[in-house]
Image (tube, rainbow, N blue to C red):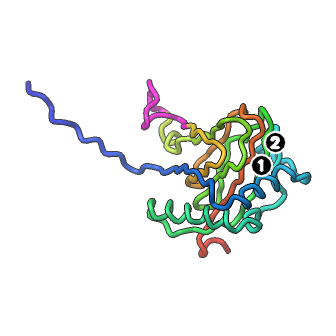
Amino acid sequence: MGKLPLTEFIDVFPLLITKQEIFGYDDDEEAEVVNTILDDGNLGNHDLIDKGHTSTTRDFFESFPKLKNCIQGAIKEYSKKVGLEEPTITHSWYGVYDQGGKIIRHNHSGSVISGAYYPYVEKKYTSIIFENPTMVLRPTDPIISATNYSTQAKGVPVQQGDLVLFPSYMYHWTDPNNSGKRCVVSFNSQTPAFSG
């Protein structure tokens, strides 16, 4: 019996998550973003957040046009890569997490591309965890090891200055925060036809 020919592996329907540093878009505005968040005495609670608080505003980027333009540029590149009409940022808000703080599993329904920008991480790094959306379709798969095809979730390590973009339908969460105080600016986007 002869050898089998080399198998061709074809990855179909991949999902794109991007991570990039966005330090240096404007030194003054970067400092103002961090100060605005850390000095906010009007933070509220949210059902998804444990040991942390959220802003009451849902249009945070309107006060920081250079940051908004920088992130909108990243959304443009992401959209081009995945073949989507470019959505625009519709809502933006921030969370402040204390030591041990976390956000529970959720997604961003009604949005196309969502993201998290980390303007302040007290210690070296933290992470955001994404759930494999195909797992719900595979309840009887006898998985014996975690691979790119079988892992149930993937953690993406992030540090201060990182921007993470992802499909809004992807469920995600964080483990309890071990990085001291952490500030995260979150946002949603939509195309004009669906933004109302």
* Res. 95 mark: 1
The amino acid pointed to by label 2 is: Gly
Quadrant (top left, top right, bottom left, bottom right) of the C terminus = bottom right
| For marks 1 and 2 on the same chain, the one whose residue lies earlier in the sequence | 2
Q: Which structural element holds mark 2?
A: strand
CA gap between label 1 and label 2 equals 7 Å
Give whichever of 162, 54 is nearer the camera. Answer: 162
* Residue 60 x %, y %: 76, 62
Q: Residue at x 57, y 53 (%)?
A: 165
Q: What secondary structure is marked by label 1? A: strand
In this view of the protein, which residue sits in the foreground, 81 or 32?
32
- Note whether 65 is above or below 145 in the view shown: below
Q: In x, y percent, where is residue 56?
A: 84, 57
Q: Main secondary structure of the magenta part?
A: loop
Q: Is residue 145 above or below residue 73?
A: above
Left or right, residue 81 beside residue 100: left
* Image position of 1 (left or right of 47): left
Labels 1 and 2 touching (C-beta < 8 A): yes
For the record, the magenta segment spans 140-154
| Residue 90 in which image quadrant | bottom right
Residue at 59% x, 38% y is 157
- Residues 157 and 26: in front is 26
Q: Residue at x 58, y 59 (%)?
A: 113
Label disc, if present, on residue 178 of the rendered structure: none
Is 142 within the magenta?
yes
Q: Residues within 10 Å of mark 1 (few under 14, many from 20)?
A: many
Q: Which numbered marker is on residue 52?
A: 2
The quarter of the image holding the N terminus is: top left
State the residue at coordinates (76%, 65%).
59
Residue 136 painted magenta? no
